[in-house]
Image (spheres, rainbow, N blue to C red):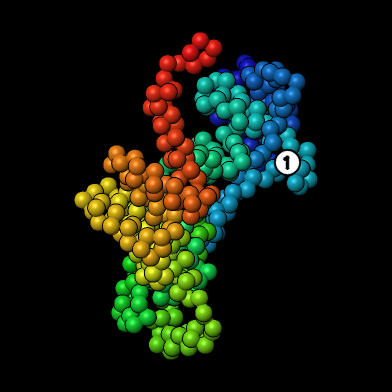
């Protein structure tokens, strides 16, 4: 019952929304206006005074419009505040006010759940959420990406390495095939690479490599489309042959060597050894051979090949006695094996060939410190009373 007026909730609603203007006024009053004034008075009594000066009995109407667009586009949500968007007459404003009062009264009576503090609609920087209104939006992912696994770190190294060699525009190198490869071999190479480097396969832990991944895949796709078509392949080959390329082998070896170093830093020793080997096949140099041997020596799964790797480093010195890389690596092996004289000899040769070789200089300083510590003349303490 509402405030002693003798009307139940159904009657209240019928008073708020009369069936027609021609119907007789309910409740024995003279007019609908009088009936409505009584309803307002009863509702206000149930609702009670505003909890704050800023509380408004007529709440702004918020309409959330969810716009669906074609697949592949972004789903957008829009909130429009209709209050003030179009002129509202006094009757309409009174009706809206009455609806709000009725809702508040029913909440007070326990017939409806109470409103949330945000009217069920909240807006954040990522979109709109609604509890019970059917309007939802996925919040923006502000969390940091997950830590890459070992396999994902290897993929990252491959992406970096392949992106580094895109500037060469060598289609055979891009697909990893020989110039004599058949169409079937071209297709097989493309399919194998697409399974790895398609942009959709980029893990969530590597978002910073998205652009490079896309560029790498585009390079692979371009290489396939050119080399799989006989006419395009012939035209591309003719164009390559017509250009002067005096340093092709050296440049190719340099690119392969850089790719090998990227893999080595990621501890993908198998891929590093393969690229260093290809680089040595192209330039026949001492450093590429020494780097290939070092990748074998550092691979924990190939410990049994350690002696063979050392022989490869010695062979690199026959190609170039001033290979600081080969000398340094042999020095490290000597230190690990406990032959400090041999280690010191190679470290000094590495510094002689390259005075700025940081690691070799550090090794020599450590050797000098050990020698001073072991010298009997330096025993017995120091200072004023040493």
In the rendered image, the vertical position of residue 79 relative to residue 158, given as above or below? above
Judging depth in this view, the residue of 269 and 355 nearest the camera is 355
Q: Is residue 308 left or right of residue 377?
A: left
Quick check: 313 left or right of 89? left
Q: Residue at x 39, y 69 (%)?
A: 284
Residue 24 picture quarter: top right
Q: Nearer the viewer, residue 133 or 272?
A: 272
Q: Is residue 251 visible?
A: yes
Q: How many marks?
A: 1
Residue shown at the point (43%, 85%) measured from the top left: 233
Q: Is residue 58 above or below residue 360?
A: above
Judging depth in this view, the residue of 276 and 341 nearest the camera is 341
Residue 346 % position (x, y): 39, 49
The outermost residue toward the left is 304
Q: Identify which residue is drawn at 41% across, 60% down.
A: 321
**Residue that badge 1 annotates:** 83
Q: Which quarter of the figure is the N terminus placed in?
A: top right
Q: Which one is nearer the viewer's eye here, 145 or 216?
A: 216
Query: Relative to residue 127, is residue 114 depicted above or below?
Result: above
Label 1: state its secondary structure: loop
Residue 190 seen anywhere in this rendered image of the structure: no
Looking at the image, the residue that sits furthest to the front is: 377
Question: In the image, what residue occupies the spot 72% across and 19% down?
Answer: 52
Name the spot of residue 161 as percent of width and height, x first.
45, 60
**Where is residue 273 drawn, in percent x and y?**
34, 59
Q: How many residues crowd mark 1 within 10 Å: few (<14), some (14–19), many (20+)?
A: few
Quadrant of res 50? top right
């Amino acid at each position: 019952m509402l405030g002693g007026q003798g009307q139940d909730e159904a009657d209240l609603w019928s008073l708020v929304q009369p069936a027609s203007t021609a119907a007789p006024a309910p409740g024995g009053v003279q007019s609908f206006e009088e009936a409505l004034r009584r309803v307002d008075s009863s509702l206000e009594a149930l609702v009670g005074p505003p909890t704050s000066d800023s509380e408004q009995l007529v709440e702004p109407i918020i309409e959330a419009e969810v716009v669906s667009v074609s697949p592949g586009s972004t789903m957008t949500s829009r909130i429009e505040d209709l209050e003030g968007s179009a002129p509202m007459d006094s009757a309409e404003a009174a009706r809206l006010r009455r609806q709000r009062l009725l809702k508040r009264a029913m909440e007070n009576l326990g017939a409806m759940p109470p409103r949330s503090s945000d009217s069920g609609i909240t807006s954040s920087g990522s979109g709109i959420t609604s509890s019970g209104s059917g309007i939802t939006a996925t919040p923006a992912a502000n969390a940091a990406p997950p830590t890459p696994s070992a396999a994902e770190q290897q993929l990252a190294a491959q992406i970096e390495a392949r992106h580094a060699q895109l500037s060469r525009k060598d289609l055979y190198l891009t697909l990893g095939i020989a110039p004599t490869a058949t169409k079937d071999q071209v297709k097989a190479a493309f399919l194998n690479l697409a399974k790895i480097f398609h942009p959709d396969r980029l893990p969530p832990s590597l978002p910073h490599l998205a652009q490079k991944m896309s560029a790498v895949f585009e390079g692979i796709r371009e290489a396939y489309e050119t080399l799989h078509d006989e006419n395009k392949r012939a035209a591309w080959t003719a164009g390559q042959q017509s250009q002067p390329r005096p340093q092709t082998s050296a440049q190719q070896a340099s690119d392969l060597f850089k790719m090998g170093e990227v893999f080595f830093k990621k501890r993908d020793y198998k891929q590093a050894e393969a690229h260093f080997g290809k680089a040595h096949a192209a330039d026949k140099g001492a450093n590429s051979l020494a780097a290939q041997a070092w990748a074998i020596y550092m691979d924990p799964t190939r410990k049994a090949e350690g002696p063979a790797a050392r022989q490869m480093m010695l062979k690199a010195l026959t190609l170039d006695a001033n290979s600081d890389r080969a000398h340094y690596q042999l020095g490290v092996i000597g230190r690990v094996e406990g032959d400090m004289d041999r280690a010191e000899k190679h470290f000094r040769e590495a510094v002689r060939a390259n005075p700025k070789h940081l690691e070799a200089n550090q090794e020599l300083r450590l050797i000098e410190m050990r020698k001073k510590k072991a010298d009997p003349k330096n025993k017995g303490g120091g200072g004023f009373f040493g």
